[in-house]
Amino acid sequence: FRSLWLGQITSQIALNMLYFVLALKVYQITRSNTAVSLLLLSFGAASLVFGIIAGSVVDYFDNRTILNFCNLTRVFILIFFFIFANNLYALYFLTILIAIITQLFIPAEAPSIPILVDKSQLLVANSLFTISFYLSTVLGFIFAGVMLKIFGQTNVFLVIILLMLFAFYFTMRLPKMAARNNNETFNLSFDFITRKILEGMGFIKAHSRINQSLIILTVSQALVATISVLAPGFADRVLTIDLYDASIFVMGPAALGLIIGAFWV
């Protein structure tokens, strides 16, 4: 569990550093909040399309294999971010690619927890995982500005690559985990995908607690995404501060709120 947890923290900080660095970079190039929104929309659209399918695909494979594949693939995509750091259209395209791979990662990550801990520890493990998810999300945004100041607009991608390599190292340490669906042969056909989507939607509809949790999760992540979209323009036009300081002065209070909220809960 510790390896899974550390892998979550490092990969989550890396990804959210990437998103905030890209948001700042796109704003610097375009001076447009709309362009920043389109960047996050390119991630969101890929998540919406491939996220529905990803969960069904992951069920047929060992979680460790999926996690290692995703982390290593994201390392290679991040290398291209470093190469094409100043090409706006390349940044949009690479964002879509990394979003697609991340959709495979998500349904293999948290469902590994019940395999790695005893039932008596499950509530604590899930709570710890949830707190670190949101905290590492905001910390990734905060570190983005600091790392940009230290390493510059291009070399900051090397820091993100290093973090993702750490995530790969941690997931490599996980034991093998049997596929959750051994009763059916994997077949990526239209009928198979449609059936799995309908099964998933039916399951959510039949379980009101899961339905409610998904709504809360969606709204909370949408709020974090909205803040990150508005942060560069808000820092530039309203606060009139250095763009790199946006990560501290705009996202910093959010991190403090998450810490206080976590202790409260």
Image (cartoon, helix red, strand yellow):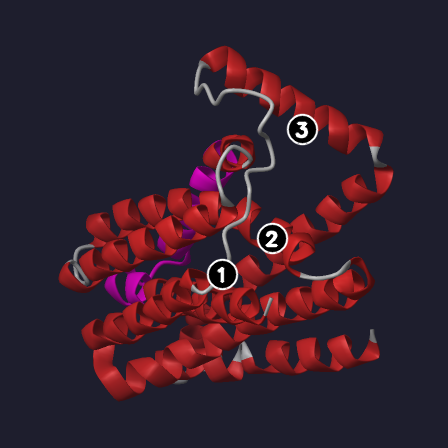
Is residue 177 at all visible to an observer of this figure? yes
**What is the quadrant of the C terminus in the image?**
bottom right
Q: Position of residue 12 (x, y in %)?
A: 48, 65
Q: Quadrant of residue 241?
A: bottom left
The reply, left or right, for residue 248 in relation to residue 198 is left
The amino acid marked with disc number 1 is: Leu
**Dot 2, how many residues are within 10 Å of its Cα: few (below 14), some (14-19), or many (20+)?**
some
Give the number of the mark in front: 3 or 1: 1
Q: Relative to the observer, which residue lies in front, 182 or 58?
A: 182
Q: Position of residue 77 (x, y in %)?
A: 26, 54
Residue identified by numbered label 2: 112
Q: Relative to the observer, which residue lies in front, 191 or 125?
A: 125
Bounds of the magenta segment:
25-49
Is residue 44 at all visible to an observer of this figure? no
Q: Are marks 2 and 1 in contact (CB under 8 Å)?
A: yes
Q: Are marks 3 and 2 in contact (CB under 8 Å)?
A: no
Vertical relation: 27 (above or below) 257: above
The reply, left or right, for residue 199 in relation to residue 120 is left
Residue 174: which disc? 1
**Dot 3, how many residues are within 10 Å of its Cα: few (below 14), some (14-19), or many (20+)?**
some
